[in-house]
Amino acid sequence: MPRHMSRLVTTIMIMVITVTIITGTITAKMIMAIMRMVMPSMSMTSIAVTIITMIAIMRMIMTASTTTTVILMLMTTNRPADNSSLNDSPALSADEGAALYRLMTWLSPAFPVGAFSYSSGIEWAVEAGDITDAASLQDWLSAMLSDGAGFCDGVFLAHVHRAASDGDDKALREVAELASAFVPSRERQLETTTQGKAFIEIARNAWAHEGMERLIAVCDSPIVYPVAVGLVSAAHGVTLSATMHGFFHAVISNWISAGARLVPLGQTDSQRVLAALESVVVATGHRALVASLDDLGGATFRSDIASMRHETQYTRLFRS
């Protein structure tokens, strides 16, 4: 074999052998024995030095390759997630942003309408043993929302919002009167009218609006809470669907807060109940948006009785 070809073959074999050693598939001692048989002209020292040198070079190459791979992985990981489906929606306009800001403020637990002092009869239900834990509270509130006062309040809110938006004063007055007459007990009447009055007064003073003053004047009867929310949100251009779902979230959150203090429940259990009722809130909101006044009604007699019995309950923390 020509001298230059012999050197080339030797170099290639040493590179292959070096990779084999690094990967751990064969030992250096075995390789040196093979090389000694294949290349008898090379001394053991030359073979060893060559292999050691090639191992060092290959390890440097592999380390550099690994470092580059890690850096590329980190660079890839640090890139913003491709949330194109979330980011495709246009930004809120100034009016839409203001409407959302107001709605979140009005329906926040921090908005001072006094909701924390009312339980909507839940206090009596706990005293009577109807509500004893998170599961029974969830069942009670689910019925109240979908088949009782919650759904009816949502229907009133929707019709008031539409009447106010359309400038239909006659329909607005009639729905406001019907909503006030629909309350099943004296304490519930106190609860909803007190909150409605507070909601109107605070919104009127903090977010003055000429159109709202006219709408308030149209309502001859006391303005109950869902009517107040529908009227004010319509005057300020807040969409009906957003108002509806925000209203139900505020109502159910206040009921859970009352139940948590009365049972009592921990914060985690309270949030589990709120999470479990999410589908009920959404479904009831959709029903209320398309319901007519002929659809008003409920089947939560025990809840109505609870609000009546609470009036004579001996020990009470709440006003309803």
Image (cartoon, rainbow, N blue to C red):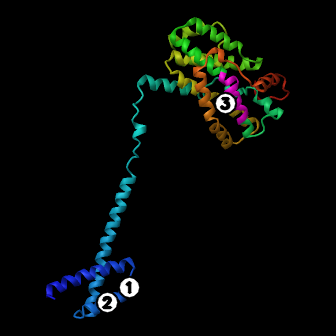
* Helix, strand or loop at mark 2: helix
Quarter of the image with the C terminus is top right
Residue 231 is at least partly visible in this image? no
The three-letter code of the residue at mark 2 reads Ile
Of circles 1 and 3, the one toward us is 1
Q: Could you say which is closer to the camera, residue 225 or residue 278?
A: 278
Please provide the residue range marked out in magenta: 138-151
- Report x, y in % for residue 61: 30, 71
Rounded to the nearest angstrom, the CA distance separating label 2 from label 1 is: 11 Å
Q: Could you say which is closer to the camera, residue 281 or residue 230?
A: 281
* Helix, strand or loop at mark 3: helix
Q: Where is mark 3, residue-wise?
A: 254
The three-letter code of the residue at mark 1 reads Thr
Of the two numbered discs 2 and 1 on the same chain, state the one appearing first in sequence.
1
Rounded to the nearest angstrom, the CA distance separating label 3 from label 2 is: 83 Å
Q: Where is mark 2, residue-wise?
A: 34
Of circles 3 and 2, the one toward us is 2
Quarter of the image with the N terminus is bottom left
Q: Residue at x 71, y 15 (%)?
A: 182
Confirm or deny contact between disc 3 and disc 2 (CB under 8 A): no
Q: Where is mark 1, residue-wise?
A: 27
Q: Residues within 10 Å of mark 2 (few under 14, many from 20)?
A: few
Q: Residue at x 34, y 79 (%)?
A: 20
Confirm or deny contact between disc 2 and disc 1 (CB under 8 A): no
- Report x, y in % for residue 29: 36, 89
Confirm or deny contact between disc 1 and disc 3 (CB under 8 A): no
